[in-house]
Image (cartoon, grey):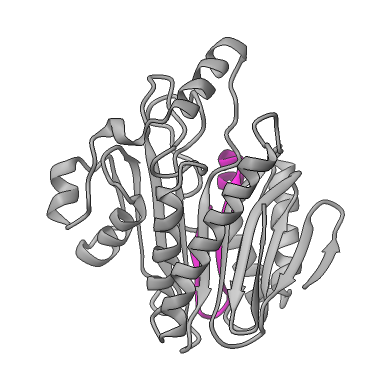
Amino acid sequence: MTHTQSSIAIRETVGSASGPLLLVHGGAGSYGPSSTPERRARVAADLRRALEAGWSLLEAGASAADAVCAAVRVMEDAEEFNAGRGAALTSEGKAQMDACLMTGEDGEVGSVAGVTAARHPIDAARAVKEQTKHVLFAHPDADQLRHWGVETEDPSYFVTEARRQSLERARLEGDEWEKHGTVGAVARDADGHVAAATSIGGITNQLPGRVGDSPLPGCGTYAADDAAAVSCTGIGEAFVKEVAAHEVADRMRFAGQSASDAAAAALDGVASHHGDGGMIVVPAKGSGVFAFNSEMMNRGWMDASGSGVEA
């Protein structure tokens, strides 16, 4: 692993330059008072479980799409992350979740916004991609999700005591931007195809109906076999204004930049919109990249040569 720094972004290069490769993230931001050694150990363990779930598929010859969805599902079930169970709560005290899946081989994408009943929002995004002629569904209800074969839960399932306390603090002390929990995965499979998946519960005390960058193709999630797969995390509004994930791919395609330099430049753009966060990048050819301009980013990688986790 190599570690470099631009004027703003910290960058790490990980994994092999060819063959199957999987990167995951569990959010970026600042550590904050809730970041105890015990919590960070749980996050690291959950990142490891996500990597193992996705890598076992890649190792067996499965597609990049299968791998990233498997990794994200593990993190959606882990209460430590702001996705699925444990999602941040809106000003009304509800979990309102977004997710996106994009595959580089065909450029196809599916996403959902404002999901309240999908146990794994990434499965709902995949259903949009594979079972409809559309790209983005807003607020699909439980009946629609079940029609797609997506597992559902009562909305109360997603609400945890820790998130209730975060919402109460935000109401009393001002908005608390939950930047620690977005989850994402990017992968390259044995055939050289890439895919990206991102899932999030939004930000604490957000207004009902708010949508961030995660479900918007090109903003928080993007994949193309002629460039890279990208999943972002951080202040969503800034990533939307920068169209950050697509910026990385375009810099690689048209400016000939490396994945590392392209990611750093995109994050400089995010900073110009008064945002911070990070991204994970797996190029069609080349090693994987972690890049972030915030204090921290929960992250991990795995390929045939080894693995690593940082939380």
Depth check, front residue: 154 or 111: 154
Q: Residue at x 49, y 23 (%)?
A: 205
Depth check, front residue: 256 or 196: 196
Q: Relative to 31, is 162 above or below?
A: above
Q: Relative to 11, is 202 above or below?
A: above
Q: Relative to 68, is 120 above or below?
A: above
Q: Residue at x 48, y 28 (%)?
A: 163
Depth check, front residue: 239 or 167: 167
Q: Relative to 164, is 73 above or below?
A: below
| Residue 201 falls within the magenta-colored stretch | no
Q: Residue at x 61, y 69 (%)?
A: 301
Depth check, front residue: 47 or 148: 47
Residue 111: give x, y in percent of width and height: 35, 54
Q: Residue furthest front?
A: 38
Residue 96: give x, y in percent of width and height: 37, 35
Q: Residue at x 58, y 21 (%)?
A: 175
Residue 62: give x, y in percent of width and height: 38, 81
Q: Residue furthest top?
A: 172
Q: Quadrant of residue 259?
A: bottom right
Q: Which residues are magenta?
A: 220-241
| Residue 239 falls within the magenta-colored stretch | yes
Q: Quadrant of residue 30?
A: top right
Q: Is residue 158 visible?
A: yes
Q: Quadrant of residue 1?
A: bottom right
Residue 77 relative to residue 42: left or right: left
Numbered circles on residues, count: 0
Q: Is residue 215 visible?
A: no
Residue 101 relative to residue 255: left or right: left
Residue 64: give x, y in percent of width and height: 44, 76
